[in-house]
Image: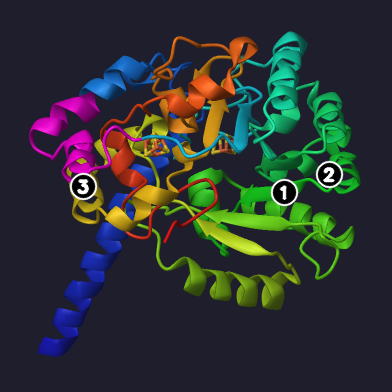
Amino acid sequence: MFIFFIMRGRLRFVCNTAILFNSLATVLNTATMKSLKARKHELSSAGHQLEILDNNGTTFPNFADKLNSLGSFPLKPQSIEILQINLGKMCNQVCEHCHVDAGPDRKEIMTRETMHDCLAAIRNCNTIHTVDLTGGAPEMNPLFTWFANEISKLGKKIIVRSNLTILVSNKKYSLLPELFKEHKITVTASLPCYTADNTDKQRGKGVFQDSIKALKILNEIGYGQPETGLELNLVYNPIGAHLPPSQEKLQTDYKKILLQNYGVVFNNLYTITNIPISRYLEFLLASGKYESYMQTLVDSFNPAAINGLMCKNTVSVSWNGKLYDCDFNQMLELPVNTGISHIKNFNNEVFKQRDIVVKQHCFACTAGAGSSCQGALV
Ligand code: SF4
Ligand code: SF4
């Protein structure tokens, strides 16, 4: 009887905890139906986010000091190999963790003129081998097809960061998989879990089923299948306030479960650490987990990750043509430390010499196995 009561007590605790977290998730989900910007939330200001991150620099070690103690400050680029272009903040989803603060209510979008500036920069910089298209949902830019065709003419590898659901959201996007195939575009797609519950919790109701639908369409035309050369990668990022597990092990689990349960295949799984900015920062603060998450990032600092940091071989272009060291610096409005602020004036030689701008959020890139848009670093 005693044991029974203890078990009942435990059970009650678990249920209450679940209720607490579900309520929190519901509150956040309801709140995040709109972007921070549309809600006029104070965290929609990059300056306010930086203030939060910087103030805690007094309790947490400073990222720049950490690099300095290892002889890696200032952080320098190796070579400019990847141009990551944000085609706009518009998205058909409003994910809880989104570092872009994207959503249907965001109207910022790259114009043809800025795309021409990007094409000129790609043409003039022979070390750039890859153009990485991101957003928002990059496919929602009405010039997406034209732009992909133009980049393809330059003979560069193209990556599209797709949320998958956009491909099945409206008839006008249904031809995109064939466009991807025509240009052998690598599809790198978010899927934070192989279960519907967990995926929908982070990304919205019904997202998992629509993602599976889109993955099947991609598989049917050869994506993720052996020897087609059509690369399909999935991206995992933690649903809670913790670091990703082992990329290798998780990939094995994803491959097994997605094949068994849905007949879906893919090439690689990339694990990405959530950066404590924007809507993920909102989640951390609302759930009281900000301090403990930052502490985890700081405690897990891995010097071996420094060499592979994506800011060392990537330059990020925002929807309005402004230049940043990475997508995260772009969202925090931390411009590149050069006299050149716009893609129309891009100069490879100047960019190779620059000092990369680092702040406290950078601890997320060096924690554990490290993190980048191409997954773990070590
Ligand atoms: S799909 Fe991507 S860009 Fe869109 S809201 Fe979700 S995380 Fe943000
Ligand atoms: S956040 Fe950006 S600048 Fe900082 S370490 Fe990561 S990639 Fe580099």
Left or right: residue 363 versus residue 59 is: right
The residue under label 1 is 187
Mark nearer the N terminus (3 vs 1):
3
In the displayed structure, would residue 71 be above or below residue 350? Answer: below
Are the residues at dot 2 and dot 1 in contact (C-beta closer than 8 Å)? yes
The residue under label 3 is 70
Disc 2 within 8 angstroms of ligand 1 (CB): no
The N terminus - image quarter: bottom left
Callout 1 crowding tier (Cα within 10 Å): few <14, some 14–19, many ≥20: many
Mark nearer the N terminus (2 vs 3):
3
Residue at x 69% of width, y 12% of height: 114
Mark 3 or mark 1: which is in front?
Answer: 3
Disc assigned to residue 280: none
Amino acid at dot 1: Val
Callout 3 crowding tier (Cα within 10 Å): few <14, some 14–19, many ≥20: few
Give 354 or 109, whichever is nearer the viewer: 354
The residue under label 2 is 180
Q: Where residue 280 sits in the image (x, y, percent)?
A: 38, 38
Are the residues at dot 2 and dot 3 in contact (C-beta closer than 8 Å)? no
Element type where label 3 sits in the image: loop
* Cα–Cα gap, marks 2 and 1: 8 Å
**Quadrant of res 345:** top right
Q: State the extent of the magenta-drawn residues as a range.
A: 52-75
Q: Regarding ligand 2, which quadrant of the image does it lie in?
A: top left
**Quadrant of res 76:** top left
* Cα–Cα gap, marks 2 and 3: 42 Å
Residue at x 74% of width, y 41% of height: 158
Left or right: residue 168 versus residue 202 is: right
Amino acid at dot 3: Leu
